[in-house]
């Protein structure tokens, strides 16, 4: 009984910390007179700080060609000019706050023209909660109109962002987000900032971002490999309860709780993932009966997806 009460006490601390999140905004970064920074100082990265965590955004700059890849940051919001000189602009035509991060996924000419994903490294493990992403103007207008290097999108084309959470170099989970989608009769090019739930990634120490386009040639992706990012929200994994600020829906009937053999999930739930308190992903299911007999006693977290919404539920396993 004493052990069971200790688990309940830990559970209260766990959910009390749900709202304790921090956010990387890029707002305090020094801004050149140009209104953008692209690594031209040769440092190889820039850093932003939120809470007690530092995020390092990596980039590369080639002074001979005045070219860059990886991360930059910008204030530009021209959503009408399709010129390469407007590569610094966010396609929504407005900023969520004063500054946003801009990514360019370059091509590795020495390795079969593969994409070079862009990365963010954190000074301490975090549990990411959410982020906003959007098209760059240069990429979006190229998708719409084409240019000398890339064609305008047609039926069955797509441009998607791949987000991978990493801990100790190993992936925790992957998120796919379409920035443009012309499949199944659609002609969608994302115009606004889009909220992405990152909570399924669990506790991580870095993030990797890649882009995939259906318009690919002999020299790699033809579509300009740009996207913009802002408001990366997270909880510090150094806290007893490192979780993202998702809705705790007490109306979702998950039973039995405490459980010893299995957990029953409502049939309306489309996907369920189970995590330990430190963010380790135990598994994921589309079925509605989850076996737990092999798991140690303790407090766990269920993430459940339904109709595009995410719900959080605490589960006690007691043998």
Image: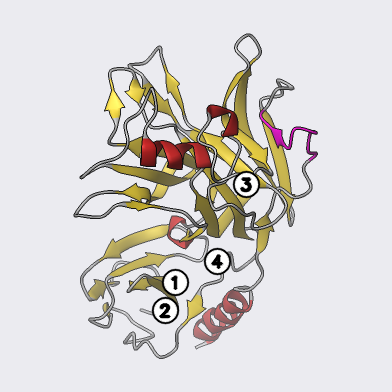
Closer mark to the observer between disc 3 and disc 1: 3
Q: Is the magenta stretch mostly helix, strand or loop?
A: loop
Left or right: residue 210 versus residue 88 is: left
In the drawing, what numbered circle is on residue 77? 3
Name which of mark 4 and mark 2 comes first in the sequence: 4
Q: Do the residues labelled 1 and 4 touch (CB within 8 Å)?
A: yes
From the top left corner, tell me how far across and down residue 48 is, in percent. 72, 45
Q: Do the residues labelled 1 and 2 touch (CB within 8 Å)?
A: yes
Left or right: residue 245 versus residue 173 is: right
Name which of mark 1 and mark 4 comes first in the sequence: 4
Q: Label 1 to label 2, Cα distance in Å?
A: 6 Å
Q: Label 4 to label 3, Cα distance in Å?
A: 33 Å
From the top left corner, tell me how far across and down residue 129 is, in percent. 54, 62
| Colouring style | secondary structure
Question: Along the line of sight, which residue is nearer the eye, 119 or 75?
Answer: 75
Q: Label 1 to label 4, Cα distance in Å?
A: 9 Å
From the top left corner, tell me how far across and down residue 184 is, in percent. 19, 54
Q: In this view, does 122 lie above or below 239?
A: above
Question: Along the line of sight, which residue is nearer the eye, 319 or 219?
Answer: 219
Question: Along the line of sight, which residue is nearer the eye, 221 or 154?
Answer: 154
Q: Which residue is drawn at 28% across and 76% down?
A: 269
Q: Are marks 4 and 2 in contact (CB under 8 Å)?
A: no
Q: Label 4 to label 2, Cα distance in Å?
A: 14 Å
Q: Label 3 to label 1, Cα distance in Å?
A: 40 Å
Q: Dot 1 corresponds to which residue?
A: 301
Q: Dot 2 corresponds to which residue?
A: 315
Q: What element carries label 3?
A: loop
Q: Is mark 4 on a helix, strand or loop?
A: loop
Tell me the magenta residue range. Answer: 30-38
Q: Dot 4 corresponds to which residue?
A: 243
């Amino acid at each position: 009984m004493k052990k069971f009460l200790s688990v309940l006490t830990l559970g209260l601390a766990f959910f009390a910390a749900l709202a304790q999140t921090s956010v990387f905004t890029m707002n305090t970064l020094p801004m050149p007179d140009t209104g953008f920074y692209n690594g031209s100082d040769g440092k190889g990265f820039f850093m932003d700080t939120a809470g007690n965590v530092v995020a390092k955004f990596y980039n590369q700059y080639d002074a001979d060609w005045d070219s860059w890849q990886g991360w930059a940051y910008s204030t530009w919001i021209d959503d009408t000019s399709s010129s390469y000189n407007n590569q610094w602009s966010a396609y929504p035509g407005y900023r969520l706050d004063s500054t946003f991060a801009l990514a360019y996924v370059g091509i590795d000419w020495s390795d079969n023209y593969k994409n070079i994903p862009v990365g963010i490294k954190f000074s301490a493990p975090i549990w990411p909660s959410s982020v906003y992403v959007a098209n760059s103007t240069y990429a979006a207008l190229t998708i719409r109109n084409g240019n000398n290097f890339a064609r305008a999108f047609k039926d069955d084309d797509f441009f998607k962002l791949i987000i991978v959470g990493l801990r100790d170099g190993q992936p925790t989970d992957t998120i796919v987000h379409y920035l443009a989608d012309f499949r199944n009769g659609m002609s969608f090019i994302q115009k606004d900032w889009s909220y992405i739930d990152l909570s399924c990634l669990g506790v991580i120490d870095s993030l990797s971002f890649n882009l995939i386009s259906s318009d690919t040639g002999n020299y790699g992706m033809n579509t300009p490999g740009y996207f913009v990012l802002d408001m990366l929200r997270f909880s510090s994994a150094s806290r007893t309860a490192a979780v993202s600020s998702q809705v705790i829906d007490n109306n979702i009937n998950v039973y039995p709780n405490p459980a010893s053999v299995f957990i029953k999930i409502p049939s309306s739930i489309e996907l369920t993932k189970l995590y330990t308190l430190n963010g380790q992903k135990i598994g994921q299911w589309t079925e509605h009966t989850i076996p737990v007999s092999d798991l140690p006693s303790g407090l766990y977290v269920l993430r459940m997806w339904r109709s595009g919404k995410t719900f959080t539920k605490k589960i006690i396993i007691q043998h």
